[in-house]
Amino acid sequence: MNKKLAAALSGGAVLVLALTGCTSGSDDSKNDALNAWAKQVCDAVQPQAKKIEAANAAIQKETSDNSEPAQVQKTDAQAFQDMSDAYKAIGDAVNKAGAPQVDNGQKKLRDAVKELHSLGASYASLKQQVDKLDTKDQAKFADGLKDIATQLDKLSRTGSDALKNLEEGDVGKAMARQPSCKSTSTSTSESAAPSTANG
């Protein structure tokens, strides 16, 4: 049953990719302030992206139908908590870096931070729902997980539009030059592959 959750989650990894999967940019913009901003954000995002990736992997691992409901509950709750913390931390890191020196930088920053904090709150809410599931009744537990998987699926589809807006143009190029952004994007893309398991 957790397979549906794992499939939905693999879509969620795309959100991190939006933040770290910058295409490699050419060095045509030598804007020091922007490069410094990008370095600060990328360096702060990398450990959080790894945390989200590890949470993804934990849920993927706990997907066999033989898994005990209590174990699945524990794993999923911890994973959602980690994701919630990570998205909030990314939001804080972006906020701390301040607005990039581009057109509408302040608005782009505000929107992206709001989006990241909202994601953090959504995952915190999913954790609370997992905690309340009845692990004694397998059928009820499976139904509960199904609901959570549906919400997770919606969550992975709801935009990271504000993040994309923040990263377009020169900001994206500056981020693409940061080693910490490059290394994150390559490792995260693997976990973003859709799950082939059908549940």
Image (cartoon, helix red, strand yellow):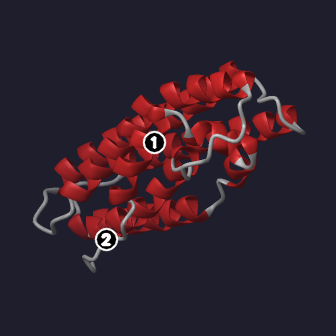
**Mark 1–mark 2 distance (CA, rounded to whole Å):** 24 Å
Q: Relative to residue 103, is residue 126 depicted above or below?
A: below
Total numbered labels: 2
Residue neighbourhood size for the residue with mark 1, other residues' Cα within 10 Å, grouped as few (<14), some (14–19), many (≥20): some
Residue 4 left/right relative to 69? right
Foreground residue among 104 and 16: 104
- Point out residue 112 in the picture as x, y percentages from the top left corner: 71, 40
Picture disc at residue 182: 1
Q: Relative to residue 30, is residue 125 depicted above or below?
A: below
- Point out residue 20 in the picture as x, y percentages from the top left corner: 52, 44
Residue farthest toward the right in the current orientation of the protein: 103
The reply to whether residue 197 is in sight is yes
Foreground residue among 47 and 27: 27
Foreground residue among 27 and 53: 27
Disc 2: which residue: 195
Question: Quick one: SS at disc 2?
Answer: loop
Foreground residue among 43 and 162: 43
**Which quarter shows the C terminus?**
bottom left
Check disc 1 and give the amino acid type: Lys
Residue at image location 84% in from the left, 35% down from the top: 102
Q: Quadrant of residue 95?
A: top right
Question: Quick one: SS at disc 1?
Answer: helix
